[in-house]
Amino acid sequence: MYRALSVLTAAAVLGAVVVAQQPPPAQGGGGRGRGRGIAIQPGQECPPGTTLVRVGVCQAPEFPAPSIVDYRPRTTLVVSEHPVPRAKFPVVDIHSHTGPTPQTLDQLLKEMDALNIRVLNNLSGGYGPELKQKVDYIRSTKYADRFTVFANGVDGFRDVAPGYGQKAAAQLEADVKAGAIGLKLFKQTGMDQVKRDGTRLKISDPELAPLWDAAGRLNIPVIIHTAEPQEFFSPLDLDNERWLELALFADRRQFLNPHKVTFEQLIAERNDLFRKHPKTRFIAAHFGWHANNLGLAATLLDEHPNVVLEIAAIIYDLGRQPRAAHDFFVKYQDRVLFGKDTYAPTEFPTSWRVLESRDEYFDYFRGYHAFWKMYGMGLPDPVLRKFYNQNALRVTPGIPKITGS
Ligand SMILES: [Zn+2]
């Protein structure tokens, strides 16, 4: 304490950061590590490589700090655990990219039954012959009530020019006749894709209006992936909550987006689309990327009655605010759907546990998404039923009826 105070006084006198390097105490001394403090002024941050050890004093560890990739401390917290290997009620996974093939059908069904996934909805249906082939295969099995497919527009929304919207609307009508039960838009559409005139295609571009109107007329939902997590649009500095993910995957660095488009711009364009097409039902994928700001998610739902949310790849945001997330799900229990995105049987139980249990401080499955721990929301049964399957059935009439739910 003496040393810290003298350092602080010195800092105050000099009006600058003072480095008080002292030789380590003799072997066996009780004060190991003391006395290497770096004083900072109120409001100042500790210099790189140091951490706050007392009020106004930073210190560097005696050993080289491990990288965030390697530091995986075991927890000593002993608390009751309630793993949830199987969802409590039958689940519609509205956001999957997996569908059955003759090679995978049996294994897939075994896994889905163990997890209590009743319907797996493949958003990567394509269009035209590709889509028809996927639907026809599903219908040729005994499991047409377990797998469904969404269509993807025409040609990945490349080179949009006058006439595209009409063409895409006609294709959607044909795809729905062939068995598609919804329309999925990938994230490139509205963010990276350029029109034939070389400008970025905005998701609210009037050229696409016939497509949204067709979806409304055909009574199918549009699941739309707009933007990316907010931090993907921030510079890759040490304050960035998604530093590791951005350092791992070059294609996620939206702060380098060639169109210099911001998160806020993309969200505004998406909301404009929702507003202009009130008769079309939209599913905002990944919670509209508002799971880290439930106030924004609430505003989105309040202002757009034609919109619902699904939770693919955002469970790590719900699991770090279990009480706020619980209250949101209770209030908006008719507006939330289950989705997972990556089909990985070992990962689903973490989602069930966040949603169903009241467990505390347990691991998420991917360190690069979330280096923090999960907590259970403990959702009540009526809310879980709606969230797991009833809302999906209402929003997507093409989902096969579920018995015993
Ligand atoms: Zn996806």
Image: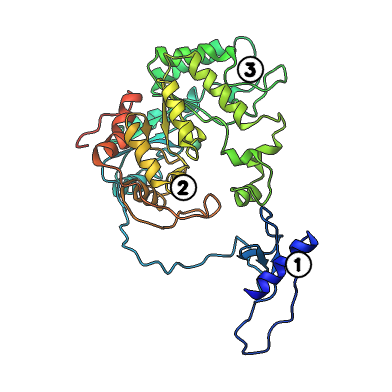
**Structural crowding at the residue carrying mark 1, measured as other residues with C-alpha within 10 Å and reported as few (<14), some (14–19) or many (≥20):** some
Q: Looking at the rendering, which quadrant does residue 199 occupy?
A: top right
Mark before the other along the chain sequence, 3 or 1: 1
Q: Position of residue 186 (x, y in %)?
A: 54, 30
**Structural crowding at the residue carrying mark 3, measured as other residues with C-alpha within 10 Å and reported as few (<14), some (14–19) or many (≥20):** many
Seen from the viewer's position, the closer of residues 334 and 312 is 334
Residue at image mark 3:
160
Callout 2, which amino acid? Tyr
| Vertical order, 171 against 32 (above or below) | above
| Mark 3 and mark 1 residues within 8 Å of each other at the beta carbon | no
Which residue is rendered at x = 36% and y = 50% of the image?
Answer: 376
Residue at image mark 2:
316
Alpha carbon distance from label 1 to label 2: 45 Å
Residue at image mark 1:
10
Mark before the other along the chain sequence, 2 or 3: 3
Callout 3, which amino acid? Val
Q: Position of residue 378 (x, y in %)?
A: 31, 47
Label 1's element? helix
Alpha carbon distance from label 3 to label 1: 66 Å
| Vertical order, 389 against 317 (above or below) | above
Of circles 1 and 2, the one toward us is 1
Q: Position of residue 123 (x, y in %)?
A: 45, 32
Which residue is rendered at x = 68% and y = 59% of the image?
Answer: 46
Mark before the other along the chain sequence, 1 or 2: 1
Q: Looking at the rendering, which quadrant does residue 98 occupy?
A: top left
Any part of residue 12 in sight = yes
